[in-house]
Image (spheres, rainbow, N blue to C red):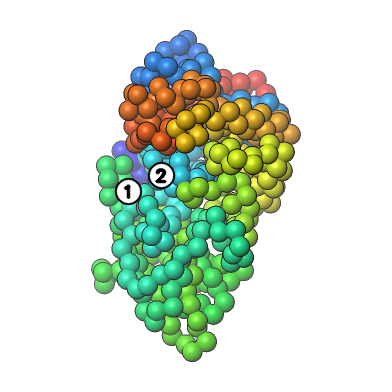
């Protein structure tokens, strides 16, 4: 039985003690010990996709340097999975592979269902439809008014951006936004706290409201961290926002993103992708550090590199310098966070020639991981190496552009990465008692 189904006293739902911690710890410790043992015995308890040409031996996290950040992350998993309390926040950054939220959706779904009662919530979202670009299917933004957009690929623009890599702005007197959920993986998604990240100076008034007159909402503004927060007295499943000019000095409203939060134990997997974005693009986001600190991530996953590698002027040295800066921003925002670098998927340039810069990207990531205590998941190697994207395309797992995956392909990547992450956690459980 999940924590969401339990009744607690008072209007505001809080996390209830639904398992005795010692019983839960022993049962789940046994479960994960057996799970880890069966993994190493070449059994398949983690539902790996049945793809003949993937390299299952490469499907693991590699730790070429210090592992202390990952020990802290696995300690948070211990609290959540073995004791049933706490939250684990994961922020994933990338390009089009992540904006569509299919790869990250599968990871989110697998993590939130790994143990009953620790689902968590949706976390950070951006209404991409307001920016006239593809929105993840799993949540549906419906808005009124006229909005203009900016994304981090715009080289000449110096406007501030945050962790979404996008912003949308309106000068209409009154506009609205409704966000609801759909799809099989989001059945019953609810939240009781919302942070709206937005431009604070000369900004319109933002208000959260409900169609249910029984719902009471309190609001407060944090000007220094750049958001307005709304606290609900009960859980809801649909977000309603109003943006309104209420004073002459209010000029516009610029939205950077929204977090949907809850008090439930579990995983929050924040997916942040921008079609075509490179490391240079993400460095243009001036509010990246400030907004990432709002999420308080325990793990940051970087899948940035496919667009760098497709640049005719690709430079491994520049790419490494850029990644150094991104890692530094993560450590400033969340000093204790673990970092995972995923190498590029195999791809072709204009469907004609294999992209051989992928090997240089992998080398850079391994050097950075050794230097900064990151982990590496070799996506390229797991896929099957050079030319493997052709096999994925023939199997219906990649699109004809030989760059992007189909939905089944992204689901397969999510399952593979989930398996690798859980293998690393299983190894942690096996050795934790000997440290």
Q: Could you give the CA–CA distance between mark 2 and mark 1, rounded to whole angstroms?
A: 8 Å
The quadrant in which the N terminus is found is top left
**Please, what secondary structure does the residue beneath circle 2 have?**
loop
Binning the other alpha carbons within 10 Å of mark 2 as few (below 14), some (14 to 19) or many (20 upward) gives many
**Residue at coordinates 71% horizontally, 31% vertically from top-left?**
367
Binning the other alpha carbons within 10 Å of mark 1 as few (below 14), some (14 to 19) or many (20 upward) gives few
The quadrant in which the C terminus is found is top right
Residue 248: % across, % down: 49, 89
Q: Does residue 78 appear in the picture of this structure? A: no
* Front-most of residues 427 and 258: 258
Dot 2 or dot 1, earlier in sequence:
2
Contact (Cβ within 8 Å) of mark 2 with mark 1: yes
From what the image shows, is residue 36 above or below residue 134? Answer: above
The label shown at residue 209 is none
Q: Which residue is mark 2?
A: 101
* Front-most of residues 295 and 53: 53
From what the image shows, is residue 323 above or below residue 426? Answer: below
* Front-most of residues 39 and 244: 244
Q: Does residue 101 appear in the picture of this structure? A: yes
Q: Which residue is mark 1?
A: 137
From what the image shows, is residue 177 above or below residue 394? Answer: below
């Amino acid at each position: 039985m999940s924590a969401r189904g339990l009744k607690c006293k008072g209007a505001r739902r809080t996390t209830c003690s639904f398992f005795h911690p010692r019983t839960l710890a022993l049962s789940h410790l046994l479960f994960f010990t057996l799970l880890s043992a069966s993994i190493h015995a070449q059994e398949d308890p983690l539902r790996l996709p049945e793809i003949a040409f993937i390299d299952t031996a490469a499907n693991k996290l590699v730790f070429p340097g210090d592992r202390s950040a990952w020990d802290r992350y696995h300690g948070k998993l211990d609290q959540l999975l073995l004791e049933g309390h706490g939250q684990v926040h994961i922020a994933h950054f990338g390009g089009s592979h992540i904006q569509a939220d299919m790869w990250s959706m599968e990871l989110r779904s697998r993590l939130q269902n790994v143990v009953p009662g620790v689902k968590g919530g949706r976390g950070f979202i951006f209404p991409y439809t307001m920016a006239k670009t593809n929105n993840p299917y799993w949540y549906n933004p419906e808005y009124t008014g006229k909005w203009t957009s900016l994304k981090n690929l715009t080289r000449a623009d110096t406007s501030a951006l945050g962790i979404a890599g996008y912003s949308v702005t309106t000068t209409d007197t009154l506009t609205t936004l409704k966000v609801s959920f759909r799809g099989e993986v989001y059945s019953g998604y609810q939240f009781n706290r919302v942070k709206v990240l937005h431009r604070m100076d000369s900004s319109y008034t933002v208000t959260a409201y409900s169609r249910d007159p029984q719902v009471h909402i309190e609001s407060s503004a944090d000007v220094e961290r750049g958001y307005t927060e709304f606290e609900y007295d009960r859980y809801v499943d649909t977000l309603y926002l109003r943006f309104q000019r209420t004073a002459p000095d209010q000029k516009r409203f610029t939205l950077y993103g929204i977090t949907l939060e809850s008090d439930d134990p579990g995983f929050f997997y924040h997916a942040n992708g921008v079609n075509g974005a490179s490391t240079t693009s993400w460095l243009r986001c001036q509010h990246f550090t400030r907004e990432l600190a709002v999420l308080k991530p325990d793990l940051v996953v970087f899948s940035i590199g496919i667009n760098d590698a497709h640049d005719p002027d690709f430079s491994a040295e520049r790419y490494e310098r850029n990644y150094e800066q991104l890692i530094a921003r993560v450590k400033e925002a969340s000093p204790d966070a673990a970092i995972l670098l995923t190498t590029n998927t195999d791809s072709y340039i204009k469907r004609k020639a294999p992209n051989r810069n992928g090997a240089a990207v992998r080398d850079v990531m391994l050097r950075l991981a050794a230097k900064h205590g990151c982990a590496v998941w070799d996506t390229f190697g797991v896929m099957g190496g050079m030319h493997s994207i052709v096999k994925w395309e023939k199997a219906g797992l990649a699109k004809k552009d030989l760059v992007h995956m189909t939905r089944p392909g992204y689901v397969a990547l999510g399952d593979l990465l989930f398996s690798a992450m859980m293998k690393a956690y299983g190894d942690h459980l096996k050795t934790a008692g000997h440290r």
